[in-house]
Amino acid sequence: MPEDSGAGGGVGESHGGAGFESPPGAAMPERREVDPRARLHELALELTRTRNRRLLVEYLRLRRAVR
């Protein structure tokens, strides 16, 4: 039988010698050093605009850490 000759299309055969390529890595966000006092100031400004408890807790923790 000609289709059982093993001459092509079998599982595990390479396709023209071009091996498997993984996708490019994901872009990493730019890392910036944040000054705790600057972050504290940003949170204070945000708290004057909104009444967000999560921000308030973060603000109080940062304020305690900076002192």
Image (cartoon, helix red, strand yellow):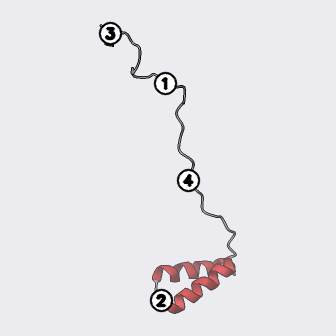
Mark sitting earlier along the chain (4/1):
1
Question: 43 above or below 18?
Answer: below
Kind of residue at disc 2: Thr
Kind of residue at disc 1: Ser
The nearer-to-camera label among 4 and 2 is 4
Identify the residue at image location x=56%, y=47%.
Answer: 24
Q: Secondary structure at mark 3?
A: helix
Task: Tell me if mark 2 has few (under 14), some (14-19) or many (20+) residues whose alpha carbon lies within 10 angstroms of its own.
Answer: few
Task: Tell me if mark 3 has few (under 14), some (14-19) or many (20+) residues whose alpha carbon lies within 10 angstroms of its own.
Answer: few
Disc sitting over residue 50 in the figure: 2
Q: Which residue is mark 4?
A: 26
Which of the 4 image quarters holds residue 13? Answer: top left
Mark sitting earlier along the chain (3/4):
3
Identify the residue at image location x=48%, y=79%.
Answer: 54
Q: Which residue is mark 1?
A: 14
The nearer-to-camera label among 3 and 4 is 3
Mark sitting earlier along the chain (4/2):
4
Residue 30 x/y as whole percent: 64, 64
Identify the residue at image location x=67%, y=81%.
Answer: 38
Q: CA distance from mark 3 to mark 4?
A: 46 Å
Mark sitting earlier along the chain (1/3):
3
Mark sitting earlier along the chain (2/3):
3
Circles 2, 3 touching at the beta carbon (< 8 Å): no
Kind of residue at disc 4: Ala
The nearer-to-camera label among 1 and 3 is 3
The nearer-to-camera label among 4 and 1 is 1
* Left or right of residue 21: residue 34: right
